[in-house]
Image (cartoon, grey):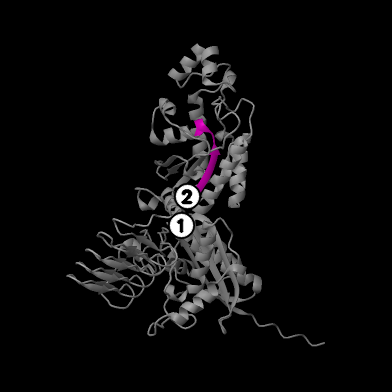
Amino acid sequence: MADQAPRPAREFVVEADGGSRGNPGPAGYGAVVLDPVTGEALVEAAEYLGVVTNNVAEYRGLLAGLRAAAELDPDATVHVRMDSKLVVEQMSGRWKIKHPDMKPLAAEAARVFPPGRVTYEWIPRASNKHADRLANEAMDAGARGEAWSPSDSTAELDAAAADRAAPAGRTAGSRRTGAASAVAPAGTEGGDGGEPAPDGGGAAADEPLARAGRDRVDAASLGAGTRAATSTGASATGTSGTGASATGASGTGASATGASGAGASVTGASGTGASATGASGAGASATGASGTGAPATGTSGTGAPATGASGTGASATGAPGLGVAAETSGEADVRAAKVVASPGWGPPDMGAPATFVLLRHGETPLTPQKRFSGSGGSDPSLSPVGREQAERVAASLARRGTIEAVVASPLARTRETAGIVAARLGLEVAIEEGLRETDFGAWEGLTFGEVRERHPADLDAWLASPDAEPTGGGESFAATGTRIAATRDRLVAAYAGRTVLLVSHVTPIKTFVRLALGAPPESLFRMELSAASLSAVAYYADGGASVRLFNETSHLR
């Protein structure tokens, strides 16, 4: 029998993208494997990643796309197309990779196929619509507390529809029809810390935004705009006077500055990242910008209407005065999550902080009775009220979509609270002994009044000094502080750059906050911490800490 001819190796095109709504913030990736001849989508992949940087999300998208291609044919050759200049240059070997989060992802991507079987090409964002939409679908699903499902995806249809609907005359570089994209990911890119290789061209990639050679900049964040009527970055400056009107620019990053005067109107800019600054004056009206992430600044004046921005992640700043629409609770949750997860005033090269979201467990039968309940007592479980509180926390955190890991004290009430939340988030619970409550010795199960009656001298000493122990050899606040500081250092090292939910107790959470503020031990008696409340502290690479939230209970109302 004659030998069969060897099967020719297949060729694939992989398009990948990633986005982060906050950088770092709630992030996701999308990737699609295409037939290079027909353009048919063979495999789609997308995933919500929790809070990571834009660059990490892009690398995760690349890795998913390469793995999907390898599953179709491990002997294939692959041409990768991405709109991330950083990833393309680094994977092509022209730029070095310095950031510790990037190195292992790049190394893993390089191992999927043998060297020489993968080539890389930078493409404009408008030509990467399919992967872009997959990444946004994943982020949207994560914001709902759900996993992305291929069966629910409309990314391919949306990309094709955008191609068909795009204006004529903008055809260069598109994968299908060449039309420019009107929708962009709701996220910005941040610096990865990469730099050009010694023998390579290009610019250093050390700044967090708008550095030389950067392929993507969030126009809304930077306030960018140029004076072109219709094109990328187009801007239209409005007229002034009675009845004046300004028709906004169209295109990626377009902005329209509104007219001023009585009866003035401004028609907002359209396109990715477009912004429309509203008209001012009595009876003024502003039609908001359209496009993903497009902001519309409302009109000013009594009764002035502001038509909000349209598109995924769009925001509209309403008209001041009568009839201003309130921010929805979901938008407020996402905005608050971005604040909690984003870096503060530190230098940009420190990277993302380790952010600890501190959750006190839900109520137990002892909580409403205000009894000492530490780590040396009966170890009560949650009451029905406490379980409902945990469910409410879980729903709130799922909407925010920022938690990447869950760590709990070993006591029953914290493990139960953490389990309810983690199940909603699709995460596992890690147990950390250092997060347990203080041991209150012989005071366990007693009220403050009962301790005053039975052990007045010991109680007075305890209130006066952090070194004093409760009756019967319990744990002093000084000892608790030492334990929490050591636990903090371990967890910061283990979860650098990530947002972690720590489910703990009154004294440990107050101690985290006290230590972050550099407050004296007596400050523990001056903080109120409710059951199932949320607090947050961010820890930076230089050792600095920032308290972002304390005793937040809106999710319980």
Q: Is residue 349 above or below residue 296?
A: above
Cα distance in 3D space between marks 2 and 1: 9 Å
Q: Report the residue at 23% width, 71% height from top.
A: 237
Q: Report the residue at 51% width, 74% height from top.
A: 158
Q: Give x and y (percent) for residue 548.
A: 41, 43
Viewer-nearest residue: 553 or 519: 553
Q: In the rendered structure, which amino acid carries the disc numbered 1?
A: Thr
Highlighted magenta segment, given as a residue range: 498-508
Quarter where residue 174 is shown:
bottom left
Which structural element holds mark 2? loop
Could one spot residue 410 in this view of the protein?
no
Q: Residue furthest right?
A: 1
Q: Give x and y (percent) for residue 317.
A: 34, 59
Q: In the rendered structure, which amino acid carries the disc numbered 2?
A: Gly
Identify the disc placed on residue 497.
Answer: 2
Identify the disc placed on residue 53.
Answer: 1
Residue 89 lies left or right of residue 285; in this view the side is: right
Q: Quadrant of the N terminus?
A: bottom right
Q: Residue furthest left?
A: 241
Q: Are marks 2 and 1 in contact (CB under 8 Å)?
A: yes
Q: Is residue 309 above or below residue 418?
A: below
Q: Give x and y (percent) for residue 402.
A: 50, 52
Residue 281 lies left or right of residue 165; in this view the side is: left
